[in-house]
């Protein structure tokens, strides 16, 4: 249902920006998460429109969870243009719906942390007394699903996925008598 309401809000936003002679260069929406980009004036107008009209659709902007992303050499200007948004970050290191979208080094560092966390979760899951529950958690939370999601989002990272696979395999072996 929310997606239908968000479509109406997005349609109104496009009309509003068009009436101002502005347009966004990029928009992506998933449920109540949105990402849009363009010239500062267009983004400011979009934020103002969503701030005013979003509550009617159940959408409230949370400025502390939102990020303003831009050219590393213009971050100070973006902080001035969006003073109510404390999270102004470089386009070298940003995320969209939990997926790293910045430079390759930032993606690699993020995926390294994902692999570390997956290995830690795999070890912790083996402490669950019921092996069926532990196996299900390994299957659905620690290995395959995690790997598929990030491989689709970030592309192949053989070293990272080998670490996740090794940790998952080790955990499964410890569950099998």
Image (cartoon, helix red, strand yellow):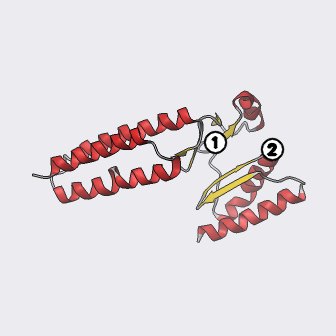
Helix, strand or loop under label 2: loop
Location of residue 136 in the rendering, given as x and y in whole percent from the top left corner: 26, 59
Query: Most extreme residue toward the left, as rendered?
Result: 177
Q: Is residue 127 left or right of residue 68?
A: left
**Residue at image location 69% in from the left, 30% down from the top:** 72
Closer to us: mark 1 or mark 2? 2
Classify residue 53 by image quadrant.
bottom right
- In-front residue for pair 10/120: 120
Location of residue 32 in the rendering, given as x and y in whole percent from the top left corner: 60, 59
Q: Which residue is mark 2?
A: 39
Would you call the spot at circle 1 few (<14 residues within 10 Å), some (14-19), or many (20 or more)?
some
Sooner in the amino-acid sequence: mark 1 or mark 2: 2
Would you call the spot at circle 2 few (<14 residues within 10 Å), some (14-19), or many (20 or more)?
few
In space, the residues marked 1 and 2 are separated at their CA atoms by 15 Å
Q: Is residue 149 left or right of residue 132?
A: right
Q: Which residue is mark 1?
A: 67
- Work out whether 156 lies above or below 89: below
Q: Is residue 72 left or right of residue 154?
A: right
**Residue at image location 83% in from the left, 60% down from the top:** 16
- In-front residue for pair 90/51: 90
- In-front residue for pair 110/130: 110
């Amino acid at each position: 249902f929310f997606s239908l309401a968000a479509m109406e809000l997005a349609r109104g936003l496009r009309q509003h920006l068009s009436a101002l002679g502005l347009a966004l260069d990029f928009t992506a929406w998933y449920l109540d998460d949105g990402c849009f980009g363009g010239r500062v004036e267009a983004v400011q107008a979009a934020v103002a429109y969503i701030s005013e009209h979003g509550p009617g659709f159940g959408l409230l902007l949370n400025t502390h969870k939102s990020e303003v992303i831009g050219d590393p050499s213009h971050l100070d200007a973006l902080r001035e243009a969006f003073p109510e948004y404390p999270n102004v970050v470089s386009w070298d290191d940003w995320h969209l719906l939990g997926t790293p979208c910045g430079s390759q080094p930032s993606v690699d560092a993020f995926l390294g942390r994902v692999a570390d966390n997956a290995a830690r979760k795999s070890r912790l899951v083996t402490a669950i007394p019921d092996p069926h529950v532990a196996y299900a958690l390994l299957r659905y939370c620690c290995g395959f699903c995690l790997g598929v999601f990030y491989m689709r989002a970030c592309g192949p990272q053989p070293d990272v996925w080998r670490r996740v696979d090794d940790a998952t395999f080790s955990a499964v072996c410890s569950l099998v008598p």
